[in-house]
Structures are given as C-alpha cells and as structure tokens.
Image: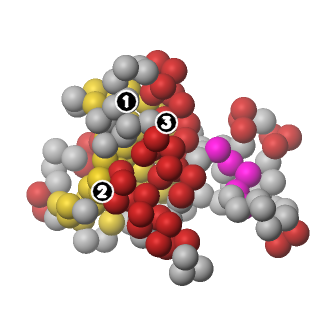
Amino acid sequence: MKIIPHSKSLELFPFMELAGEVAKQATCKRSKCGSIIVKNGKVIGSGFNSPPGNLESERRCTCDKKTLDFKVTDKTCCIHAEQRAIMDALKNHPNEIEYSRLYFARLSESGEIEFSGEPYCTICSKMALDTGIKEFVLYRKEGICIYDTEEYNSFSFAYKNHI
C-alpha cells in the first residue's frame, strides 16, 4: 500500500471528488457510495450502490439480517458501487479496464466524502482482481491509500477472518 498524505494528494483528490459525486446517485438507505475507474486520466466506468436494477421491489434495507441463511454472506441488498463501476467499464470500455485504477468514496450523512476504514469487501476485491484492475484507491484518515489489487484482496480476506 502506498499512502499519499492529504497535503500531497492534489492530483488524486479530483478523482475522489468525482467518486463522491457519483455516490450522490446512490439510493441505498444505509450508505451512499460511489466508484469510478480511471485509465490514463480518463474515467472509463462509474457506479453507485442501489438495489439490483434500481428496483424498489428488491430493497431489503430494513429486513433482519440475522434471519438470512448462513450462505448469504453479503448482507446488503444493494449492488455495490465498485461492482457497478466494473460492469460499466466492461460494457463501455472492455479493452481499457486492464491496469486501470478504481477509486471508492463513501459519503457522510451531510454529503461529504468520509474516511474509509480497512479493506473488507471480498466480493468487490475479487471482481476487481479478476477483471485486471491494477489498483484500488481509498480515502483514509492517513491520506489517499493506493493498494495493489492483489494486496487489497488479501487485506479484505484477512479482515473477514477477524469478524
């Protein structure tokens, strides 16, 4: 992982802001997240979290997650922002996704980009790794953190093992 201190992240922060703008489209009732995928300074994919197909009938935000079968490991009803961004890039720029960089942003209740925690989503980390995305970028307290996608995937699985 490479940490770019906030004071030196001026060239990266506009991409984080753009991921934050995409997050404003999220319809999830629990958190507003956005992702963009960038290759050579150009956005090739974007996505936000919301129920599959943006269908209100697929919303399960208020269901008791404890009632779900143990095989249901992803307890959210939403398609993740990262998943949507990857699908968007594969659909519209399939030849450019390899060696690209994925930026992820989560918004606070006031609509500001908030700091991310540790990598933990193995669904998104595996998908990013499998599609050839080179780097995964989070806005963290210590700065903008750039992870090699394989490293991000390993951290995500390590986090899951501590739950």
Q: Is 53 placed left or right of 35 in the picture? A: right
The quarter of the picture where residue 42 lies is: top left
The residue that appears at 82% across and 72% down in the rendered structure is 66
Mark 3 vs mark 1, CA separation in Å:
10 Å
Return the x and y of residue 122 as percentages of the image width and height.
54, 58
Which secondary structure lies at badge 1? Answer: loop
Residue closest to the far left: 8
Which secondary structure lies at badge 3? Answer: helix
Q: Earlier in the sequence, mark 2 or mark 3?
A: 3
Mark 2, residue position? 147
Q: Kindly identify the amino acid type of the residue bearing the numbered disc 1.
A: Ile
Mark 1, residue position? 97
Can residue 13 be seen by looking at this rendering? yes
Mark 3, residue position? 85
Q: Kindly identify the amino acid type of the residue bearing the numbered disc 3.
A: Ala
Q: Can you say whether 6 is above or below 148 in the image?
A: below
| First to last magenta residue range | 75-79
Name the quarter where the N terminus is drawn.
Answer: bottom left
Can residue 137 be seen by looking at this rendering? no
Return the x and y of residue 54 as percentages of the image width and height.
71, 35
Instruction: Report if the CB atoms under discs 3 and 1 are less than 8 Å apart.
Output: no
Q: Earlier in the sequence, mark 2 or mark 1?
A: 1
Within 10 Å of disc 3 (Cα), the crowding (few <14, some 14-19, many 20+) is: many
Q: Earlier in the sequence, mark 3 or mark 1?
A: 3
